[in-house]
């Protein structure tokens, strides 16, 4: 993993904690939340305050996430909103934390100037020993306060001030006045600078979790389902049906189509489908060459083409299917029949623009695992686990490619592959055109109408 860290592909955008004051605040917050301490004088933290260095020190990557069900967090600065979330157990956790920070940024900026803010993403489930208990999680509530309890004290002081103003003899109540003065020394003038961190609640209908080998739960769709990375029989009884695993390719393809969750990249507006397909083919060739222990050199396209010639009829079916699709796009070749049974099928799809776009792209990366660029962008946990199993030759190629082609323009790469972020307003922009006008064919993705040439 050292190569990934050096290139900024792992542990990137973490927040450095090195000043003695912030280190001391973090230690107090750790003791408050989990009863543990660190002996480190400097370290890095993610959006939740988790530190990989402290995780190694304690031998516990879940010291802020007991049972992997109720993530706790420590905020030392609002700049944490830009940091990643490491060891994520739920796909929704980072988005919830970021939205909490952005919604309360002014308050959190003032509070973190005094003390660390600690809190928890709470749900009604405290242990998830079975998949059925996991599915009881439907709503996440965020509660937070400083270690010194500034928010709670400010609320208490506001109540005392109201008593002082409304009770006829409040101005003569020495105990009331003394308590107000004591709290005001800690909170400041809450009448002029109010302090509050209201509870925020988030629904969690559709999500991915790393528990039980990896589950994709879709409840808020027309046809709910669960997709498991392990055999579906391993889940036992669950309250959602149907349950698929990754071997049920036809059923998953049909389910994606019925819910209108995915679209063919050749029909995606504004996408250079030919360039994307060509890059996917390169990734597949690298995997094939690595499996056969063939030398790939710098893996330039000319070198990869030589490997393709060498493999000939032994080329992977994924490569052959994408090559046929590329011929159709660029040279008007025969329309390829790539059904959901074909190994290339899920390489030809991307998520439609909807609120669960990133979640669907995560699922597609499981079904098209040789597309390492998509896997890195949308499913870091799967990417790092896969990277650990690759040969050093493939690791070097993938790391160099991502540093060269992705890190220089992350937003541009995401937009080119997946389209604009869901919910973005495209009014006033020219309507992008398809990569190629489509003929009146009935293929694995339905019918298309020929447009003007």
Image (cartoon, rainbow, N blue to C red):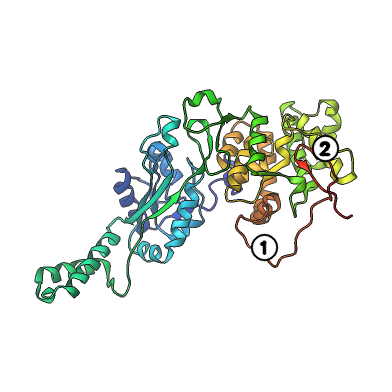
Image height check: is 151 above or below 213? below
Q: Secondary structure at mark 2?
A: helix
* Closer to us: 85 or 154: 154
Q: Nearer the viewer, mark 2 or mark 1?
A: 1
Q: Residue at x 27, y 70 (%)?
A: 188
Q: CA distance from mark 2 to mark 1?
A: 33 Å
Image height check: is 182 above or below 362? below
Quadrant position of the N terminus in the picture: top right
Q: Which x, y percent locates residue 162? A: 22, 71
Q: Which x, y percent locates residue 149? A: 27, 58
Q: Which x, y percent locates residue 47? A: 46, 52
Within 10 angstroms of label 1, few (less than 14), some, or many (20 or more) residues? few
Image height check: is 261 above or below 143? above
Q: Residue at x 82, y 48 (%)?
A: 449
Q: Which mark is residue 426?
A: 1
Q: Which circle's residue, 2 or 1, is located before the other in the chain?
A: 2
Q: Which mark is residue 216?
A: none
Q: Which x, y percent locates residue 416? A: 71, 53
* Closer to us: 64 or 190: 190
């Amino acid at each position: 993993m050292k190569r990934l860290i050096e290139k900024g592909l792992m542990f990137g955008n973490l927040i450095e904690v090195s000043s003695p004051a912030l280190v001391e605040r973090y230690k107090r917050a750790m003791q408050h939340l989990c009863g543990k301490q660190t002996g480190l004088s400097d370290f890095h933290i993610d959006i939740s305050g988790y530190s990989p260095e402290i995780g190694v020190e304690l031998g516990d990557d879940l010291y802020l996430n007991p049972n992997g069900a109720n993530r706790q967090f420590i905020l030392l600065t609002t700049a944490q909103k830009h940091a990643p979330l490491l060891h994520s157990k739920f796909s929704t956790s980072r988005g919830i934390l970021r939205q909490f920070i952005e919604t309360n940024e002014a308050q959190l900026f003032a509070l973190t100037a005094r003390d660390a803010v600690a809190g928890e993403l709470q749900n009604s489930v405290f242990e998830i020993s079975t998949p059925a208990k996991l599915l009881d999680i439907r709503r996440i509530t965020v509660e937070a306060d400083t270690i010194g309890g500034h928010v709670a004290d400010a609320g208490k002081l506001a109540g005392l001030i109201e008593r002082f103003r409304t009770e006829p003899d409040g101005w003569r109540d020495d105990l009331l006045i003394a308590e107000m003065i004591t709290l005001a020394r800690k909170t400041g003038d809450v009448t002029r600078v109010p302090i509050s961190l209201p509870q925020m609640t988030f629904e969690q209908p559709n999500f991915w979790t790393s528990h039980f080998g990896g589950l994709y739960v879709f409840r808020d769709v027309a046809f709910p389902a669960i997709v498991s990375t392990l055999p579906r029989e391993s889940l036992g009884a669950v309250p959602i049906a149907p349950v698929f695993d990754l071997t049920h390719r036809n059923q998953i393809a049909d389910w994606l189509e019925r819910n209108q969750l995915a679209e063919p990249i050749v029909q995606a507006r504004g996408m250079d489908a030919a360039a994307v397909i060509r890059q996917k083919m390169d990734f597949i060739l690298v995997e094939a060459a690595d499996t056969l222990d063939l030398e790939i050199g710098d893996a330039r396209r000319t070198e990869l083409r030589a490997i393709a010639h060498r493999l000939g009829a032994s080329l992977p079916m994924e490569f052959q299917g994408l090559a046929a699709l590329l011929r159709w796009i660029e040279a008007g070749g025969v329309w390829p029949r790539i059904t959901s049974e074909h190994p290339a099928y899920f390489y030809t799809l991307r998520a439609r623009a909807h609120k669960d776009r990133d979640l669907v792209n995560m699922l597609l990366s499981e079904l098209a695992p040789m597309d390492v660029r998509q896997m890195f962008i949308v499913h870091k946990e799967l990417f790092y686990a896969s990277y650990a199993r690759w040969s050093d030759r493939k690791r070097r190629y993938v790391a160099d490619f991502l540093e060269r082609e992705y890190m220089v323009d992350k937003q541009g790469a995401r937009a080119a592959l997946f389209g604009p972020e869901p919910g973005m307003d495209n009014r006033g922009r020219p309507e992008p055109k398809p990569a190629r006008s489509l003929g009146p064919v009935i293929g694995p993705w339905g019918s298309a109408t020929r447009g003007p040439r």
